Amino acid sequence: MVPDYIPQNNYHLGTLSWYPQDERARLFYSNKNNGNGFYFNIMVSQKDPDEWLKWENDKIDRYYDSIEGIDGETLITKLVSGVKKNFIYKKNDIYYVIEYQKINEDNSIDGELPVSEVAKIIRSLKNPENVDKSIFNLPETDFRVYSMEDLKIAREIVGFDFKLPIDEFLGKYTGIMASEERKYISLNFQGSLDLLETQKTPYYYEQFTKLGKLEMADSEKGWFEKMEGNWEYINNRKVLKIVNTYDLLEDQKEPDRDIEYIWCENDVYYCVTYFGYTTPIDIEKIMKHIMDSKTFDEISNVK
């Protein structure tokens, strides 16, 4: 089931995602205050939350609880900067896990959804065909693509032709989004691989071109221990390779790393990102495949 109610004055549904690896859905609600403020999630799964939380190793407490006469459990999970509280509600063997509060290390409240609102959300749960579809409308600046017809709209939104790998070499798409405001199209694949295409010069590409080095932006300093860049040639194209190294966690022998490749072709910048590339992957083969892929216009003109 899905909620037929959300706190209308403060939130809208940002994304609705499906995670096939652990068979759960995620409803992510953004704050309407210009993207700032508290965000909350609803996770839906037949599996006990412990099964899909255990890989994060961040569950620290779970106990029976009740809000406004609704029986369930409170689940407290650890964050880098504090903790977050979730309420677990179970009905017909389905778990609904609602994140409703974030607490800083100094015990101050970083953001919260009142428990009265949590209770309203739970009481509003209905089968999808019976809910008010208008509460699932997404912001117009972020257009979600689900069909070839949607891709035509995405082409108009971004205003440029974009590469569209359509065979199974990269695996299945997990999401495609076009942004009218930021003028880019984002293609997400299974296996933590993303392809972003834009006519705007990426920040770090411009920085490295001018300075020959990377100076980490303040917004990135809380995420990465270091950021390294260098030029490479792949498929006879000059490509900027960026490696982001995360802080080493207590239970890790090797830190997590992301790798990003950026190149420019016909006034379009292509950004390929692989998250957690300590897992073996033939990224150069993937890069060549993306570079040789047909564009949307080329595919659409095939008769």
Image (tube, grey):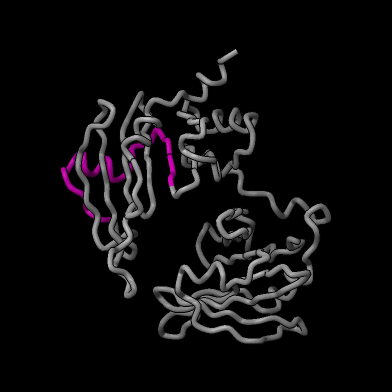
* Residue at left offset 33%, top offset 65%: 222
In terms of depth relative to the viewer, which is nearer, 231 or 101? 231
**x and y percentages locating residue 241 in the rendered image:** 26, 42
Question: Image quarter for residue 126?
Answer: bottom right
Above or below, comparing residue 144 to residue 61 in the picture: above
**x and y percentages locating residue 69 in the rendered image:** 77, 84
Above or below, comparing residue 281 to residue 54 in the picture: above
Stretch of the chain drawn in magenta: 193-216
Q: Which residue lies furthest to the top in this view?
A: 303
* 149 relative to 190 in the view: left or right: right
* 239 relative to 64 in the view: left or right: left
In the rendered image, the quadrant that contains the C terminus is: top right
**x and y percentages locating residue 195 in the rendered image:** 43, 40
In the rendered image, the quadrant that contains the N terminus is: bottom right
User: Is residue 36 a member of the stretch shown in magenta?
Assistant: no
Above or below, comparing residue 60 to residue 248 in the picture: below
* Residue at left offset 48%, top offset 41%: 186
User: Is residue 206 a member of the stretch shown in magenta?
Assistant: yes
Q: Residue furthest right?
A: 130
**x and y percentages locating residue 296 in the rendered image:** 51, 25
Circle count: 0
In terms of depth relative to the viewer, which is nearer, 86 or 153? 86
* Residue at left offset 69%, top offset 62%: 8
* 187 relative to 248 in the view: left or right: right
Question: Image quarter for residue 115?
Answer: bottom right
Above or below, comparing residue 271 to residue 295 in the picture: below
Q: Residue furthest front?
A: 280
* Residue at left offset 41%, top offset 85%: 106
